[in-house]
Image (cartoon, rainbow, N blue to C red):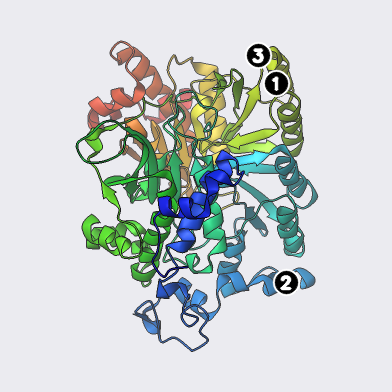
């Protein structure tokens, strides 16, 4: 084989994928995967020269940062790679002890989180490419929760699954069981590329431009198989938006790939479907991803993302965890230099094309992840509401039966902490709905509780300042008993500044805080922001109230929504309503006097 590297298109031609009998999905997968491999053949940092990756010489620096300057987590990784802690997992299982010292951090490389002092137990975070699960896998997760966990699972805002209350002696069994059902948790925590998300309706959404699941899966497997893509300066998120009707919040990711259509043009770009690349979404730091001008074919997304991640690995800040995300490298360098450094690691030139010359998809359906919706094949998908993402084992097993009996044996998870059952024919719809409701869950789109999102909270996370899940459930029940909304309102409760529940993109967002009371002690409370949104409604919510006690939340939100219904212009959305009012005007909508709170 010649030494020259190949473009994605040349790679496809070389291996004759189109004539090999592969399915369209397999061809798409191999296109990105093979081209990504070949484009890295001559990059010395990959260790392809036999020296760089596997050297055992003691390093005096980590990518140029002296060892003495490394932050605590970087020193832990330098002492021993997180992927090399499996022996510790086995040893701790044999002696029934929790991880200690640096192994607490290294366990996260296998998706295992020792969550003390919130709970004296371990939490498992899976890795589910694009949020797509077979019913066999879904049942397997239910069995893990039943055999070794608490009898329930939590669906996350990265279309993923977490299982809590695991004991150290069961961790090897859990990891082996994941492997047995075709899943993994490798790299789902610590400083790694997290779960790759994709439009949950992709492949059967009538409004989408392209099925992105093959590319999300290709990205997932490329990351898993390349050891040098572990141990980044901080975590890293990647998402694919197919142009479909349901949001995957791609603009909150470090890399968001958005499908667009390019028509006839004078730039020499062949008409067709491409991806725009957006960079540096990190809404916990009040920033959405920004279009960087790059236009990619689907097959090019994998090698370009890999190249950019490697630029981040080599140049990201390893001294200060607060400045260790991709955003801060790009803030220091600017897009131009960042893309120049990325280009050096690629065998093909990235193309630049103005965003305004692309045909962008239609606006998102705000709660299109719930209810009954048509598919491209004449069948339907059913979006099921799972309140704040929590599901019991019995509910999981029953839903797997529904998907097998009436659907196509598949379940899709969403970033909105719910799930979708695709492939239900018209004649089976009613039977499927009856079976879903028999589980205690519902498909109906309730404008109040359908958009209720909550992170784990203080019951299971040491960082959380409030019981977000408990407060969210109580708030939903309170509001549902008081009013009916004719438009969806999303309410996000997050426990801390990490913003796992993405409070800044909620219509109403709350971040947990400790509130001091008269006797000097503290209670659960929240800082409240209003008016957030993503995608075509992109907006960072503004802070309106600080340090609101948790027991004041229900009457405050009730008053706010009542004022919205009374004072909005025609059918104005809550987001538009809250954005046109000043912070002072919004505060005036609510009476926070003790007598009023007590009366409520």
Determine whether, in the image, residue 155 is placed left or right of residue 137: left
Residue at the image point whose x is 60% and y is 24% from the top: 381
- Seen in the picture, residue 337 relative to 136 is either above or below; the reply is below
Residue extending farthest to the left is 266
Residue 543 at x, y percent in the picture: 31, 39
Front-most of 401 and 43? 43
Q: Earlier in the sequence, mark 1 or mark 2?
A: 2
Front-most of 513 and 384? 384
Q: Earlier in the sequence, mark 1 or mark 3?
A: 3
Which image quarter: residue 586?
top left
Q: Secondary structure at mark 3?
A: helix
The answer to whether one can see residue 513 in this image is no
Determine whether, in the image, residue 65 is placed left or right of residue 439: left
- Seen in the picture, residue 455 relative to 452 is either above or below; the reply is below
Task: Determine the CA span between mark 1 and mark 3.
Answer: 18 Å
Kindly report which numbered mark, 1 or 3, lies closer to the viewer in this rendering: 3
Task: Determine the CA span between mark 1 and mark 2.
Answer: 42 Å
Task: For label 2, count other residues whose C-alpha is less than 10 Å away and answer few (under 14), some (14-19) or many (20+).
Answer: some
Residue 264 at x, y percent in the picture: 26, 31
The answer to whether one can see residue 365 in this image is yes
Q: Secondary structure at mark 2?
A: helix
Q: Earlier in the sequence, mark 2 or mark 3?
A: 2
Residue at the image point whose x is 71% and y is 46% from the top: 141
Please give the residue where the numbered disc 3 appears in the rendered image: 426
Marks 2 & 3, CB-CB < 8 Å contact: no
Please give the residue where the numbered disc 2 appears in the rendered image: 92
Front-most of 119 and 286? 286
Determine whether, in the image, residue 510 is placed left or right of residue 344: right
Please give the residue where the numbered disc 1 appears in the rendered image: 437
């Amino acid at each position: 084989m010649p030494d020259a590297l190949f473009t994605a298109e040349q790679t496809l031609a070389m291996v004759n994928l189109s004539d090999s009998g592969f399915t369209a999905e397999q061809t798409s997968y191999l296109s990105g995967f093979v081209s990504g491999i070949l484009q890295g053949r001559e990059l010395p940092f990959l260790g392809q020269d036999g020296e760089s990756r596997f050297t055992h010489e003691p390093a005096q620096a980590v990518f140029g940062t002296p060892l003495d300057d490394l932050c605590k987590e970087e020193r832990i990784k330098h002492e021993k790679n997180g992927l090399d802690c499996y022996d510790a997992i086995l040893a701790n299982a044999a002696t029934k002890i929790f991880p200690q010292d640096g192994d607490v951090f290294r366990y996260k490389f296998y998706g295992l989180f020792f969550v003390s002092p919130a709970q004296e137990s371990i939490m498992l975070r899976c890795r589910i490419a694009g949020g797509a699960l077979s019913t066999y896998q879904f049942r397997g997760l239910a069995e893990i929760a039943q055999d070794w966990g608490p009898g329930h699972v939590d669906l996350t805002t990265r279309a993923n699954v977490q299982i809590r209350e695991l004991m150290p002696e069961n961790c090897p069994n859990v990891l082996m069981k994941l492997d047995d059902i075709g899943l993994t948790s490798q790299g789902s925590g610590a400083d790694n590329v997290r779960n790759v998300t994709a439009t949950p309706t992709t492949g059967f959404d009538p409004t989408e431009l392209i099925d992105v699941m093959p590319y999300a899966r290709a990205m997932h497997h490329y990351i898993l198989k390349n050891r040098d893509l572990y141990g980044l300066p901080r975590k890293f998120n990647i998402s694919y938006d197919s142009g479909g009707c349901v949001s995957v919040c791609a603009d909150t990711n470090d890399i968001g790939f958005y499908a667009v259509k390019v028509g006839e043009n004078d730039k020499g770009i062949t008409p067709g479907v491409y991806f725009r690349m957006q960079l540096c979404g990190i809404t916990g730091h009040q920033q959405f991803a920004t279009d960087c001008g790059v236009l990619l074919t689907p097959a090019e997304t994998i090698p370009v993302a890999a190249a950019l991640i490697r630029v981040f690995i080599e140049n990201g800040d390893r001294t200060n965890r607060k400045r260790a995300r991709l955003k801060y490298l790009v803030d220091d360098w600017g897009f131009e230099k960042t893309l120049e450094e990325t280009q050096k690691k690629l065998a093909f030139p990235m193309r630049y094309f103005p965003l305004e010359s692309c045909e962008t998809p239609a606006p998102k359906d705000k709660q299109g992840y719930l209810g009954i919706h048509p598919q491209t094949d004449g069948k339907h998908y059913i979006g099921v509401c799972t309140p704040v993402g929590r599901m019991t084992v019995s509910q999981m097993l029953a839903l797997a039966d529904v998907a097998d009996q009436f659907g196509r044996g598949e379940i899709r998870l969403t970033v909105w902490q719910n799930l979708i059952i695709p492939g239900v024919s018209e004649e089976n719809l009613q039977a499927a709905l009856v079976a879903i409701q028999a589980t205690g869950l519902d498909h109906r789109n309730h404008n109040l509780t359908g958009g209720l999102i909550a992170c784990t909270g203080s019951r299971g996370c040491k960082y959380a300042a409030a019981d977000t899940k408990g407060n969210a459930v109580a708030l939903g029940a309170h509001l549902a008993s008081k009013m009916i909304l004719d438009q969806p309102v999303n309410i996000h409760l997050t426990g801390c500044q990490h913003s796992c529940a993405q409070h800044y993109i909620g219509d109403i967002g709350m971040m947990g805080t400790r509130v001091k009371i008269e006797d000097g002690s503290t209670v659960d409370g929240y800082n409240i922001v209003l008016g957030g949104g993503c995608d075509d409604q992109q907006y960072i919510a503004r802070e309106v109230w600080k340090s609101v006690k948790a027991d004041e939340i229900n009457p405050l939100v009730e008053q706010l929504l009542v004022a919205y219904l009374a004072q909005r212009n025609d059918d104005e959305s809550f987001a538009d309503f809250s954005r046109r009012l000043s912070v002072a005007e919004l505060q005036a909508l609510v009476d926070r006097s003790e007598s009023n709170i007590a009366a409520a």
